[in-house]
Image: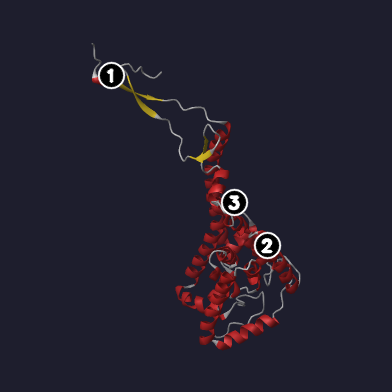
Amino acid sequence: MTVAPLTQRWSTRAIARPALPARLRRVEWRRQFTRPVLAGVTALGVLLWIQYILMFPIAIDGHAYFAADSVHLYVRPVGSPDAYFYSPAFAQVLAPFQSLGWDTFRTFWRLAELAALTAFVGPFIGLALFVGPLAGEVNLANIHLLLAAAMVAGFRWPAAWSFVLLTKVTPGIGLLWFAVRREWRSLRIALGATALIASVSIVFAPGLWVDWIGTLYGAKAPVGETVVLNIPLWLRVLAAAALVAWGARTNQRWTVLVAGFVALPVTWLYSASMLAAIPLAILSGRKTDGLGWLRRRLGLLQEQLDQSGHAHVQRRWAPIRVEAPGVGGFPDLP
């Protein structure tokens, strides 16, 4: 019997890639198309945003937090430069960061807002920076994006609501979510954390709390082109409460974000940036993996359909290489 040389016994053949099902071809196209487009738009958006903040470097709202005087907090009217209307506790927490200097403080605050926005919109951050209220919110270094982040986080960690109650106050109407759903433990945690922080603050500056309450009672909302909802605050709070109550009964988490925006003391144009967190609030309420579902729908993961029609996720589709014997009764693969 003639034996073939060792080098000829086995040959390596690459099996041709099988034809992809039509649905998989669409997913593959979306995956290949979406990534470079999103990367390009993100890069362009970031570059334009950097140019924007270089043209308008003064983060007006953030400077009010940086310049807050722990002795005379409430001396400026609403809408004036460096006007401060949040609780003394918020100013006390930020006081140590004033030693960093204005440029460093402004940079870190903007990065925090940008991180929150990225968490809301994910790979669409580049597109988001083209939206006026979103870019303006980050540039001004306000807290609306951080408020929205606290609200979304509050569904899982109720103590996050203390940030809302100790700053804008009235968006705290979202706590009705826990009351309507009889989630009393979560409601106790939210209110308890707020009371604990306030108690510590009162010990150090009881007079500032008296001033703050008096300031809130006598404050008058400004009216202008940049105010979105020129409606009395008490009417907006009632509407927000009704919306939250309906959302709690129907398990619609996005209503808490909308109600928080409606119930803001002053609804500036860039306050609408809070609504960017709505998709994240919806996905966080899904019983399944909401973010994984979103990635699959966008084609960022590749779906392969087996013969029975069930879908499963396969991160790579590569040619299969096998070793086929050339002799011994096993013919080479064509």
Q: Residue at x 46, y 28 (%)?
A: 17
Image coloring type: secondary structure
The label shown at residue 8 is: 1
Percent x, y for residue 245?
A: 69, 66
Q: Residue at x 47, y 68 (%)?
A: 104
Residue 49 sits above or below residue 330 on the image: below
**Closer to the N terminus: mark 1 or mark 3?**
1
Q: In whole angstroms, how far apart are the C-alphas of marks 1 and 3? A: 57 Å
248 or 137, which lies in front? 248
Q: Nearer the viewer, mark 3 or mark 2?
A: 2
**Closer to the N terminus: mark 3 or mark 2?**
3
Instruction: Tell me the kind of residue under disc 1.
Output: Gln
Examine the rendering and report whether any part of residue 162 can be seen: no
Question: According to the image, label 3 marks what residue?
Answer: 127
Horizontal side of residue 39 vs 259, given as left or right: left
Percent x, y for residue 299?
A: 55, 42
Percent x, y for residue 273?
A: 63, 61
Q: Residue at x 66, y 85 (%)?
A: 214
Q: Nearer the viewer, mark 1 or mark 3?
A: 1
Instruction: Tell me the kind of residue under disc 3.
Output: Leu
- Secondary element under disc 2, as helix, strand or loop, is helix
Residue 239 sits above or below residue 26 on the image: below
- Secondary element under disc 1, as helix, strand or loop, is helix
Quadrant where the C terminus sits is top left
